[in-house]
Image: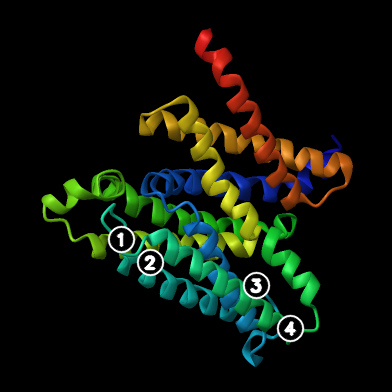
């Protein structure tokens, strides 16, 4: 590959590695909680916030302005508060996934209404869905790494508590853990990650980085550490392949990585019986 192309892809690839690192970990929690579409819903809520912010004068029409980011983050915090208020146990009267699905549908419809007032509806819709990871700068990579590092440190310090409420909420309740408080802290930290990720990679790619590596890892392992290792390796390999295919065939990078995730997941699932026999 041309050295100039490698240099051009260096920052986007670094961003993809950062996305892989934090989203694979959060994906373990999401899959264990059974709220698979929480990332998609929060990402759509964040995109709605960014869309609304683009219509107000202070943004200047720049989707990467600080005003747009904070507006989007505020919307995400509201979503995090709503999700944490709904019990996620088996005896819940209203399933949390139902609330998540409703939130996604309403946020999507509201985004369409907001975009109808914009002169660049099609382009903004495309960026919101698949993003433009190739446009990421080293400054954005640095800020994103610092933010995700802080979130990762927070989760590492309280890892036992977060894993307990995700994997065994009944035991957490029996031990006197305040589920709603810790759910809110989980979704709050999750909101910080999603808001930044959507601005870089778009809704669909962020969803894939969260869910696909975790699901693929569950095919091969039960232990959390092994699942994280498999997910991180898969995310890294898919990022490399997706960007390579994007350059080779002149395709949109975000959509190419999403499709590569799907292809690699199918291959890993198909290979499981062979690996098991071996």
Question: Which residue is pictured at 57% across the width and 53% down the height?
Answer: 207
Q: Can residue 18 be seen in this view?
A: no
Which of the two discs, 4 and 2, labels the residue nearer the N terminus?
Answer: 2
Question: Residue under circle 4?
Answer: 116
Image side of residue 29 versus residue 103, left or right: left
Question: Residue under circle 1?
Answer: 183
Which of the two discs, 3 and 1, labels the residue nearer the N terminus?
Answer: 3
- Element carrying mark 3: loop
Distance CA(mark 3)–CA(mark 4): 20 Å
The colour scheme used to paint the residues is rainbow
Which is more foreground, mark 2 or mark 3? 2
- Element carrying mark 2: helix
Distance CA(mark 4)–CA(mark 2): 28 Å
Distance CA(mark 3)–CA(mark 1): 29 Å
Distance CA(mark 4)–CA(mark 1): 35 Å
Question: Residue under circle 2?
Answer: 83
- Element carrying mark 1: helix
Instruction: Residue lying at the far bottom in this picture: please name it.
Output: 57
Which is more foreground, mark 3 or mark 4? 4
Q: Position of residue 269 (x, y in %)?
A: 58, 27
Q: Where is residue 194 in the image (x, y as percent from the top left)?
A: 51, 61
In the picture, the disc for residue 64 is: 3
């Amino acid at each position: 590959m041309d050295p100039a192309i490698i240099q051009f892809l260096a920052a986007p690839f670094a961003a993809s590695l950062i996305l892989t690192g934090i989203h694979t970990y959060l994906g373990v929690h999401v899959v264990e909680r059974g709220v698979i579409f929480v990332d998609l819903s929060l990402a759509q809520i964040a995109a709605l916030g960014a869309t609304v912010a683009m219509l107000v004068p202070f943004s200047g029409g720049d989707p990467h302005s600080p005003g747009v980011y904070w507006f989007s983050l505020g919307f995400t915090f509201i979503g995090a508060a709503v999700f944490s208020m709904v019990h996620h146990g088996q005896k819940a009267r209203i399933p949390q996934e139902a609330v998540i699905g409703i939130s996604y549908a309403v946020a999507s419809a509201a985004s369409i209404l907001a975009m109808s007032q914009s002169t660049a509806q099609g382009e903004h819709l495309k960026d919101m869905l698949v993003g433009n990871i190739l446009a990421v700068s080293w400054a954005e990579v640095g800020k994103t790494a610092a933010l995700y590092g802080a979130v990762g440190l927070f989760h590492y310090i309280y890892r036992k508590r977060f894993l307990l409420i995700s994997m065994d909420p009944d035991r957490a309740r029996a031990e006197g853990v305040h589920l709603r408080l810790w759910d809110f802290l989980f979704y709050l930290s999750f909101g910080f990650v999603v808001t930044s990720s959507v601005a870089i990679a778009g809704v669909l790619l962020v969803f894939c980085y969260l869910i696909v590596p975790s699901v693929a890892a569950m095919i091969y392992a039960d232990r959390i550490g092994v699942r994280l290792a498999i997910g991180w390796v898969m995310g890294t390999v898919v990022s490399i392949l997706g960007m390579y295919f994007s350059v080779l065939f002149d395709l949109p990078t975000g959509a190419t990585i999403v499709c590569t995730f799907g292809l690699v997941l199918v291959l890993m699932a198909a290979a499981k019986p062979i690996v098991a026999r071996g």
